[in-house]
């Protein structure tokens, strides 16, 4: 992803491994994507689309809906999210 942002936009980016499996993307110290908030990794091109929109002064595109887990598993996840 860092190479994609640099090659496509000429912007240097930094990837810092997290200790807890998080995947957060910051632009100018502002959080623009969070695996913890979405419950998933970004889809192909999603972070680039967010970056491009911010760079052009537009509102970033809405994130795709997270699929709901079915039945019992969904109820457990919903309780844990609280």
Image: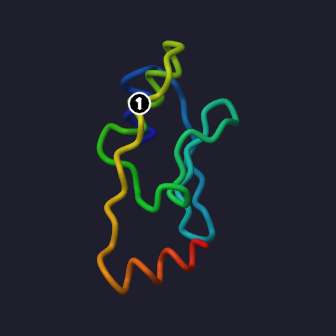
User: Residue 67, percent across and down?
Assistant: 31, 61
Q: Quadrant of the C terminus?
A: bottom right
Quarter location, residue 14:
top right
The single residue placed furthest to the right in the displayed view is: 29
Q: Residue at horizontal 29%, vertical 76%?
A: 70
Q: Residue at horizontal 46%, vertical 62%?
A: 39
Above/below status of 26 relative to 53: below
Q: Quadrant of the N terminus?
A: top left
Quarter location, residue 37:
bottom right
Q: Residue at horizontal 37%, vertical 23%?
A: 8
Return the residue at label 1.
61
Above/below status of 53 relative to 77: above
Left or right: where does residue 23 sit relative to residue 5?
A: right
Q: Residue at horizontal 50%, vertical 74%?
A: 78
Q: How many marks?
A: 1
Above/below status of 9 relative to 67: above
Left or right: where does residue 52 sit relative to residue 68?
A: right
Above/below status of 11 relative to 3: above
Element under label 1?
loop
The single residue placed furthest to the top in the displayed view is: 56
Q: How is the image coloured?
A: rainbow
Q: Residues within 10 Å of mark 1 (few under 14, many from 20)?
A: some
The single residue placed furthest to the bottom in the displayed view is: 72
User: Residue 26, percent across and down?
Assistant: 61, 40
User: Residue 33, percent across and down?
Assistant: 52, 45
């Amino acid at each position: 992803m860092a190479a994609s942002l640099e090659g496509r936009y000429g912007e240097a980016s930094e990837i810092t491994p997290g200790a807890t499996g998080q995947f957060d993307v910051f632009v100018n110290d502002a959080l623009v994507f969070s695996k913890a908030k979405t419950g998933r990794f970004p889809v192909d091109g999603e972070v680039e689309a967010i970056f491009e929109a911010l760079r052009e002064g537009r509102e970033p595109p809405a994130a795709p809906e997270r699929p709901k887990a079915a039945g019992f598993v969904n109820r457990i996840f919903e309780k844990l999210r609280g």
